[in-house]
Image: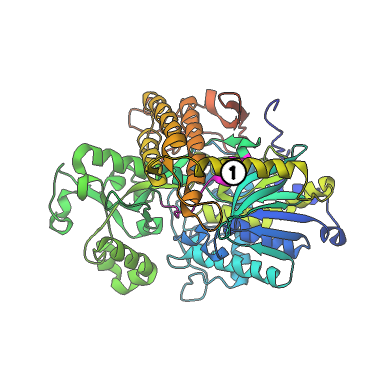
């Protein structure tokens, strides 16, 4: 690759850039659409919504899902809400305010044009979901209810109690299944995508493993859409579902797709702490709880008294103290860093002093238990079942944990990667969130990509690049199939004695220690050494029992962990190369006297896009970021 592809950013005023782009995009006749095959990988919000929309437009769509039902995609776990600018009179919200909050929240490390488009589309998403029957919460008079999320001074988050992701996914799922019933979508479940097929440099299909039979399958199409989610499970302990993985985007990267800003990973401040050494997943407590909950720690280090025995004057509501304007609604990266700092200083509570309190007692006393239960009932029940403590009687104990990945495959304004014909949607791409995603914006981006952006941009590309259908016996398909078989055989033939989970746990420890809430050059270099050593041991000492035929959960894990080693190495390299602090990427060497992130706009106001290099170290390309509507400023929430 000679350099970075053209990001195809629109010229002229941002305010109508997306409208002008759509108006000037080429179209395809309905008759021709019925002869074009599109392959969608993933059935979360981005995948289900775009598959349903493209099928409704007349395309022949094949959808591959890792799960036994699209309803089990990890989008179902999102709790708090979805942002949209709908000019709520009380708050005076607007598209421009959501645009500026998103760009500022990402610490000016995202494209202006993408943030503007997302803010513009946001209101349409709510209309679409209401039309599908999504049961958003409503006020007494019938209007849609909203609440606040971090990084905003307006209440623009629409929600369905603490199950917003579930309800939005069910809406997209119903739209998808209608197209399945009409024969326009072929839905294939329990498929694990293990390789991307390119022909003459264009994405034309994938190799997938059937998780029940073990058979390797070739699926071809005129274009491929990856909607497979993020990569937080590289940390082992994260809020992601156990089967969330990065294999689809990582294999695409190895085929030539640039990977943008992989070190931009978000640590969520409100998660239930790990209970024991055998735990393999963490549970998120929605950011929406910070609307009514107050975060605090004992003022005196080492204070082990029960929370309810610590008087008010001996409590430190540290976010309210440090950030009086935003208080407990400071963005996630800021809240996570401050919580960890105080725990490291000895103020933490719970086992090992690795927790802070999220206290709803003031809200319960003011508004009543029934009111709080109506807002957060399922979250309160979930917390009690996991922790054994009643959150109505004593404060929740929470601690930051890996949650979301802003990094992902580089895409242009049309959502196409550096591989022609390969579109990337949702959390799998690097687009509008910059160095830090605001709460409730993930669902917004996934549905914007799926319902509104990709259906337009995919059509625009296909209008001039349809190509002939590819047969499954094409040499490129055979080559991809053979390489996948070889990879599987090498794992099964390794005669080691160490289980896959042991390597994954060790890798996660390296990453959270050296590329977690904060990073420094020495730690990142040590992390690179440790990851390389682990990867070498994995090749010779891992034990993968069973065979390729039939279900093999250990083989599934081994395949994804082998990809995680390469991804972890790239994350560490990216964090080491970006010698500044911005958003969730906090380098200890680059901070202000007050301990805030210190950006370097002169040298790092760009997107770092990494090219895979089979012969050596990955190659770093840069896409300069231009700001015309909102000039970069110090990101302050005080």
Q: Is residue 142 above or below residue 149?
A: below
Q: Is residue 346 above or below residue 45?
A: above
Please name whichever residue, 354 or 311, is drawn nearer the observer in this view of the structure: 354
Q: Which residue is mark 1?
A: 249
The answer to whether residue 346 is magenta is no
| Residue interval drawn in magenta | 239-252
Where does the N terminus fall, quadrant-wise?
top right
- Identify the image quadrant of residue 67: bottom right
Image x and y of residue 138, in percent: 49, 72
Image x and y of residue 267, in percent: 40, 44
The answer to whether residue 243 is magenta is yes
Which residue corresponds to the image point at 62% horizontal and 57% vertical from the top-left? 47
Query: How crowded is the residue under tag 1: few (<14 C-alpha within 10 Å), some, or many (20+)?
Result: many
Note whether residue 439 is visible: no
Which residue corresponds to the image point at 47% horizontal and 40% vertical from the top-left? 494
Where does the C terminus fall, quadrant-wise?
top left
Which residue corresponds to the image point at 83% horizontal and 53% vertical from the top-left? 27
- Identify the image quadrant of residue 291: bottom left
Image x and y of residue 566, in percent: 51, 35
């Amino acid at each position: 690759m000679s350099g970075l592809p053209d990001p195809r950013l629109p010229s002229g005023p941002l305010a109508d850039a997306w409208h002008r782009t759509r108006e000037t995009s080429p179209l395809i006749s309905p008759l021709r659409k019925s002869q074009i095959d599109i392959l969608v990988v993933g059935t979360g919000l981005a995948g289900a919504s775009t598959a349903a929309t493209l099928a409704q437009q007349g395309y022949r769509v094949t959808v591959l899902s890792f799960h036994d039902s699209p309803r089990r995609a990890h989008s179902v776990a999102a709790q708090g809400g979805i942002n949209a600018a709908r000019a709520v009179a009380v708050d005076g919200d607007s598209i421009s305010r959501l645009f500026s909050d998103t760009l500022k929240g990402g610490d000016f490390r995202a494209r202006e044009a993408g943030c503007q488009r997302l803010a513009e589309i946001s209101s349409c998403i709510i209309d679409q979901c209401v039309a599908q029957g999504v049961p958003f919460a409503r006020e007494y008079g019938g209007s849609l209810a909203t609440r606040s999320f971090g990084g905003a001074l307006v209440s623009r988050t629409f929600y369905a109690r603490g199950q917003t992701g579930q309800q939005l996914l069910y809406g997209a799922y119903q739209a998808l299944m209608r197209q399945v019933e009409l024969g326009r979508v072929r839905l294939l479940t329990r498929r694990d995508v293990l390789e991307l097929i390119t022909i003459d440099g264009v994405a034309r299909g994938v190799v997938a493993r059937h998780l029940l039979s073990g058979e390797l399958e070739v699926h071809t199409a005129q274009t491929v859409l990856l909607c497979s989610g993020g990569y937080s499970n590289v940390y082992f302990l994260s809020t992601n579902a156990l089967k969330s993985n990065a294999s689809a985007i990582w294999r695409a990267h190895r085929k030539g797709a640039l990977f943008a800003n992989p070190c931009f990973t978000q640590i969520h401040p409100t998660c239930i702490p790990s209970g024991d050494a055998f735990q393999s997943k963490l549970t998120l407590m929605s950011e929406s709880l910070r609307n009514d909950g107050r975060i605090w720690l004992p003022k005196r280090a080492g204070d082990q008294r029960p929370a309810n025995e610590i008087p008010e004057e001996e409590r430190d509501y540290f976010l309210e103290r440090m950030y009086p304007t935003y208080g407990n609604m400071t963005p996630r990266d800021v809240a996570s860093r401050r919580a960890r700092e105080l725990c490291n200083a000895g103020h933490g509570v719970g086992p090992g002093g690795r927790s802070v309190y999220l206290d709803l007692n003031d809200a319960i006393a003011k508004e009543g238990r029934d009111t709080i239960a109506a807002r957060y009932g399922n979250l309160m029940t979930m917390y009690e079942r996991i922790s054994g403590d009643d959150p109505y009687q004593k404060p929740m104990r929470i601690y930051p944990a890996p949650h979301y990945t802003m990094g992902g495959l580089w895409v242009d304004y049309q959502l196409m990667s550096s591989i022609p014909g390969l579109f990337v949607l949702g959390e799998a791409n690097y687009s509008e969130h910059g160095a830090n995603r605001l709460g409730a914006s993930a669902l917004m981006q996934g549905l914007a990509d799926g319902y509104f952006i990709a259906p337009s941009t995919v059509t625009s590309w296909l209008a001039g690049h349809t190509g002939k259908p590819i047969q499954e016996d094409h040499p490129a398909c055979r080559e991809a199939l053979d390489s996948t078989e070889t990879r599987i055989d090498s794992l099964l033939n390794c005669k080691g004695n160490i289980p896959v989970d042991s390597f994954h746990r060790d890798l996660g420890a390296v990453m959270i220690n050296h590329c977690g809430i904060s990073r420094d050059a020495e730690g990142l270099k040590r992390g690179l050494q440790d990851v390389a050593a682990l990867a070498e041991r994995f090749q010779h000492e891992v034990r993968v029992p069973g065979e390729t035929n039939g279900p093999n959960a250990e083989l599934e894990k081994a395949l994804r962990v082998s990809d995680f080693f390469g991804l972890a190495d790239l994350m560490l390299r990216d964090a080491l190369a970006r010698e500044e602090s911005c958003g969730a990427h906090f380098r200890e060497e680059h901070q202000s006297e007050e301990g805030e992130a210190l950006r370097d706009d002169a040298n790092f106001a760009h997107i770092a896009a990494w090219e895979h290099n089979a012969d050596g170290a990955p190659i770093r390309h840069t896409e300069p970021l231009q700001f015309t509507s909102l000039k970069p400023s110090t990101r302050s929430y005080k």
